[in-house]
Amino acid sequence: MKSKMQKTVIVQLRVAAPFSQPSVSCEHSSGHKPGEAKEFTLSCSSEGGYPKGQLLWILENQTPIDSSFSVHSSADAAGLFALHSQLSISRALSRNLSCVLLNPSLQQNLSTPAVCVPPTTGTCGLC
C-alpha cells in the first residue's frame, strides 16, 4: 500500500511602497507684521507609501517634539497613503527642526529640514 505524503507550504507575502521625500512649508502666525512673527505653523507632507507610515518632528539634537501636532492620513484608490502633519511652534524653536518620515516595512527614514525665517513679504521661506 502506497501512502501519499502531504506537505504544507506557508508563503508570506509582504507588500510595501516607498513614500516620497517629505515636503515642508512654513507660515508665520497671523496678526503680526512680517519679520515680527513669534510663532510659525509648519506643514509636512509625504505620499505614495504603503503601509501607513509615521511623520515626526525632530530637533537638531535628534529630540522628538512631543507637543501637540496633528497627523492626518488618507489612502488613494490604489491603497497608497498620503500623510500630512502640522505643527505650531515658537520662533525660537523653529530653527534646526526637521520633519521625518518613517516607513518601518522598508526601513525608510527620510528627513527634510524646515527652518523658518521671518519674511519681508508676508510668507515664510525655507532656508
Image (spheres, grey):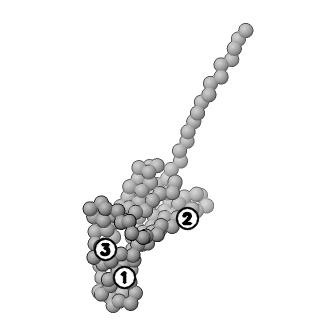
Q: Quadrant of residue 119?
A: bottom left
Amino acid, disc 2: Ser
Q: What separation in Å lies between label 2 and label 3 (alpha carbons)?
A: 27 Å
Quadrant holding the N terminus: top right
- Residue 92's spot in the image, x, y percent? 27, 76
Amino acid, disc 3: Ser
User: Dot 1, how many residues are within 10 Å of its Cα: few (below 14), some (14-19), or many (20+)?
Assistant: many
In the figure, is residue 126 to the left or right of 19?
left
Report which residue position mark 1 lands on. Answer: 28
| Local secondary structure at mark 1 | strand
Residue placed furthest toward the right? 1
Report which residue position mark 2 lands on. Answer: 74
Q: What separation in Å lies between label 1 and label 2 (alpha carbons)?
A: 26 Å
Q: Earlier in the sequence, mark 1 or mark 2?
A: 1
In the figure, is residue 124 to the left or right of 79?
left
Q: Is residue 126 above or below residue 109?
A: below
Q: Is residue 54 above or below residue 7?
A: below
The answer, for residue 119, to whether it is visible in the render is no
Report which residue position mark 3 lands on. Answer: 94
Q: Name which residue lies at 27% across and 64% down.
A: 60
| Local secondary structure at mark 2 | strand
Callout in the foreground (2, 3): 3
Q: Name which residue lies at 69% across and 14% down.
A: 3
